Image: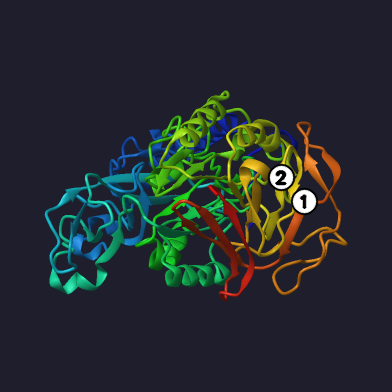
């Protein structure tokens, strides 16, 4: 696909913030639509669309008119697809159900019940319309419709069945029973549970293979560390990035077999900044997902939030704000995200219910692969991770599996070989790059041997680099890169409570082969 020409040099586009890019696109595309519409009206080509040329580019709004002929079809013909769940701020009593419809529908809703053949009354849902403007001759105008239902006051540790519908399509109809799905709320005090994680998924056979693995695992929830579907193919955070909104349709269809029953907890990567929709680039995420509103500003940064499941406090962050490598959104919250992180980590660490604190975000704090380490992440957040004794950090960005030793004060606090263990209070934090979620794998620096279970090498020094504020590569020789694997993979974490709580962490390939395992321990 060609890159559309918007009359702005690439060197200037790279210097624009996301807010500047959004304003540029809004002005450019709105003016283009006005000129095209005016020409069409003058030629007698358009009728019955008064005011269409005045709609701002890239808006998320309630539709004022049907975008396609399908919108005029009977409700029964508009079949929902792409169901995906998300936990609420309290996973014991809250669940968010989301899905997509091919066109605008009337009165969308969800029914839930204790059995698939006994769904209860209708619970109203919200329809969100996402308009993606055309760009030159390389991308058509796209209209997408997402529906979200918030379920509160649920019973802990309970399996619920649900069906989604709208006027003209009732999931309680026995003929539609096969479309009924289920989810389970968090128990009050689970003795153990499993969650999974990866980043950099996209659409393709590698991603689908990992989804099939997760269907078998059926984790309590899945953490997605950003670069979700790659509708933005370049991920440079510039107005010239190639973009195809239809990728999101394929993504949700691909993930539905697992995401309809496993809460899919996403955060934002560099490929998820979409300047067409909002000044910070997250209007698309707000339309497509319904995430916990427990962050510092859910409307500004929907991928920043926290929740506690069992004995694990989980924190999702938006590393686009602190990245030195790709600074399009650098500093957009004016430090509020980092201040919120400090407060949140302090609260979680003080809680008697929380044994472990797990933080996940996109850009790598420690990695030796293609993008290496981001000095902005290190400068902004590593002091907080150390102060509040974070147990495990999960990143994406580099399309590999790589795992550090326990790191304390920027150095190896304890070597953690395959099968080893660490105690964060004493040893420091383990950082995992879990970016093998489906996109083409990256490699490692020359001379850095691939090292994983069954193919373990002694840790050698690796020549790599970190990004600086001036976007320069600062070389560094490191000894913390303990395990490295090139290929599709996912992280599986079993959290165990009790007098000797532990996180049993494993990494597995898209075929289920284990490539790494270690334990993070608390208590005695």
Where on the picture, by quarter, is residue 205? bottom right
Q: Position of residue 365 (x, y in %)?
A: 68, 44
Residue located beneath label 2 in the image: 407
Helix, strand or loop at mark 2: strand
Residue located beneath label 1 in the image: 480
Q: Position of residue 198 (x, y in %)?
A: 56, 58
Image quadrant holding the N terminus, namely bottom right
Give 112 or 287, whichever is nearer the viewer. 112
Looking at the image, how many numbered discs can be counted on the residues? 2
Residue drawn at the location 87% of the way across and 61% of the way down: 446
* 371 over 388 or under it: above or below: below
Give 510 or 32, whichever is nearer the viewer. 510
Marks 1 and 2, how far apart at CA: 7 Å
Q: Position of residue 63 (x, y in %)?
A: 30, 42
Q: Residues within 10 Å of mark 2 (few under 14, many from 20)?
A: many
Q: Is residue 39 shown left or right of residue 172?
A: right
* 188 over 494 or under it: above or below: above
Q: Which mark is residue 232?
A: none
Q: Is residue 3 shown left or right of residue 169?
A: right
Q: Are marks 1 and 2 in contact (CB under 8 Å)?
A: yes
Residue drawn at the location 39% of the way across and 64% of the way down: 256
Is residue 111 in sight in this rendering?
yes
Where on the picture, by quarter, is residue 180? bottom left
Q: Position of residue 360 (x, y in %)?
A: 56, 46
Q: Residues within 10 Å of mark 1 (few under 14, many from 20)?
A: many
């Amino acid at each position: 696909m060609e890159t559309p020409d918007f009359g702005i040099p690439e060197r200037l586009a790279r210097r624009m913030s996301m807010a500047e890019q959004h304003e540029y696109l809004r002005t450019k595309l709105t003016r283009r639509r006005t000129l095209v519409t005016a020409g069409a009206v003058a030629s007698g080509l358009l009728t019955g669309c008064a005011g269409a040329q005045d709609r701002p580019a890239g808006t998320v709004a309630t539709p004022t008119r049907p975008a396609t002929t399908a919108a005029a079809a009977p409700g029964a013909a508009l079949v929902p697809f792409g169901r995906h769940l998300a936990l609420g701020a309290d996973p014991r009593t809250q669940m968010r159900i989301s899905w997509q419809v091919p066109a605008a529908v009337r009165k969308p809703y969800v029914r839930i019940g204790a059995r698939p053949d006994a769904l209860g009354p209708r619970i109203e849902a919200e329809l969100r319309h996402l308009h993606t403007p055309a760009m030159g001759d390389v991308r058509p105008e796209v209209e997408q419709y997402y529906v979200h239902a918030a379920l509160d006051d649920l019973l802990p540790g309970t399996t619920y069945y649900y069906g989604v519908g709208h006027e003209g399509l009732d999931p309680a109809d026995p003929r539609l029973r096969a479309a009924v799905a289920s989810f389970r709320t968090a128990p009050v005090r689970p003795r153990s549970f499993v969650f999974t994680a990866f980043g950099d998924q996209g659409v393709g056979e590698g991603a689908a293979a990992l989804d099939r693995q997760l269907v078998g695992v059926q984790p309590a929830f899945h953490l997605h560390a950003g670069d979700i579907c790659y509708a933005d193919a370049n991920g440079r955070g510039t107005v010239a990035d190639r973009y195809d909104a239809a990728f999101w349709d394929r993504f949700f269809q691909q993930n539905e077999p697992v995401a309809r029953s496993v809460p899919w907890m996403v955060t934002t990567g560099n490929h998820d900044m979409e300047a067409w929709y909002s000044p910070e680039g997250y209007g698309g995420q707000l339309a497509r997902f319904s995430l916990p509103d427990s962050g510092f500003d859910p409307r500004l940064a929907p991928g920043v939030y926290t929740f506690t499941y069992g004995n694990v406090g989980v924190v999702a962050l938006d590393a686009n704000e602190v990245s030195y490598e790709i600074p399009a959104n650098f500093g957009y919250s004016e430090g509020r995200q980092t201040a919120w992180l400090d407060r949140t980590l302090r609260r979680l660490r003080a809680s008697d219910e929380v044994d472990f604190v797990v933080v996940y975000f996109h850009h790598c704090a420690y990695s030796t692969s293609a993008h290496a380490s981001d000095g902005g992440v290190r400068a902004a957040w590593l002091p907080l991770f150390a102060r509040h004794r974070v147990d495990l950090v999960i990143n994406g960005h580099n399309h590999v599996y790589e795992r550090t030793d326990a790191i304390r004060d920027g150095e190896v606090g304890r070597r953690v070989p395959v099968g080893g263990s660490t105690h964060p209070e004493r040893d420091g934090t383990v950082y995992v790059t879990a970016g093998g979620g489906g996109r083409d794998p990256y490699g490692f620096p020359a001379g850095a041997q691939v090292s994983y279970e069954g193919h373990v090498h002694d840790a050698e020094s690796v020549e790599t680099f970190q990004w600086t504020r001036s976007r320069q590569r600062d070389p560094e020789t490191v000894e913390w890169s303990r395990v490295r694997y090139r290929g599709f993979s996912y992280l599986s974490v079993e959290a165990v409570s009790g007098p000797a709580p532990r996180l049993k962490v494993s990494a597995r390939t898209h075929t289920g082969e284990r490539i790494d395992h270690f334990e993070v321990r608390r208590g005695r």
